[in-house]
Amino acid sequence: MNAFEAMDDVIFDTLGVIAQVQRRPNPSVLIPLVVRDGVERLGEFQQVIGRARHVVARNVEWVFRRGDEVTLDCRTQAVEALVRDDGLVNEAVLYG
């Protein structure tokens, strides 16, 4: 295990929450996610035009695709887009 994987374990154990994720028509699974609320959306001239919720998952557990459903705190939101994927973790922005 390299230093980055060990650090991911610490971050997910400390900041992670267990969430339900589903890619229809498959059944849902429970995985740990790191939730980033209030991430700024920037407009054409770098002005803030809104805020969004981002979720981060380890690639060994889940790789997000557009349309996946994430349930947190009894609220289900669909994945709007994949923001980044560095090979170890991937981050997606949720609708709403």
Image (cartoon, rainbow, N blue to C red):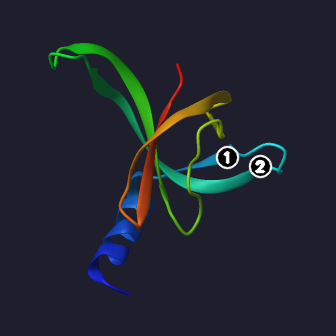
Residue appearing at x 68%, y 54% in the figure: 30
Type of amino acid under label 2: Ser
Task: Look at the picture and state if 76 lies above or below 87.
Answer: above
Residue drawn where x is 68% and y is 46% of the image: 20
**Which of the pair 20/86 is nearer the observer?**
86
Instruction: Check the image and report above or below for 81 versus 48.
Output: below
Q: Which mark is residue 28?
A: 2
Task: State the residue lying farthest toward the front.
Answer: 44
Q: Quadrant of residue 42?
A: top left
Callout 2 crowding tier (Cα within 10 Å): few <14, some 14–19, many ≥20: some
Residue 23, position in %: x, y? 73, 46
Name the residue located 27 percent from the left edge and 80 percent from the top edge.
Answer: 3
**Circle number at residue 43:** none
- The residue positioned 21% from the left and 17% from the top of the image is 44
**Dot 1: few (<14), some (14–19), or many (≥20) neighbours within 10 Å?**
many
Instruction: Mark 1 or mark 2: name the one nearer the start of the chain.
Output: 1
In the image, residue 67 lies at what x, y percent?
65, 35
Q: Secondary structure at mark 2?
A: loop
Seen in the picture, residue 18 relative to 51 is either above or below; the reply is: below
Contact between labelled residues 2 and 1, with CB atoms less than 8 Å apart: yes
Relative depth, front residue between 31 and 62: 62
Mark 1 lies on residue:
21
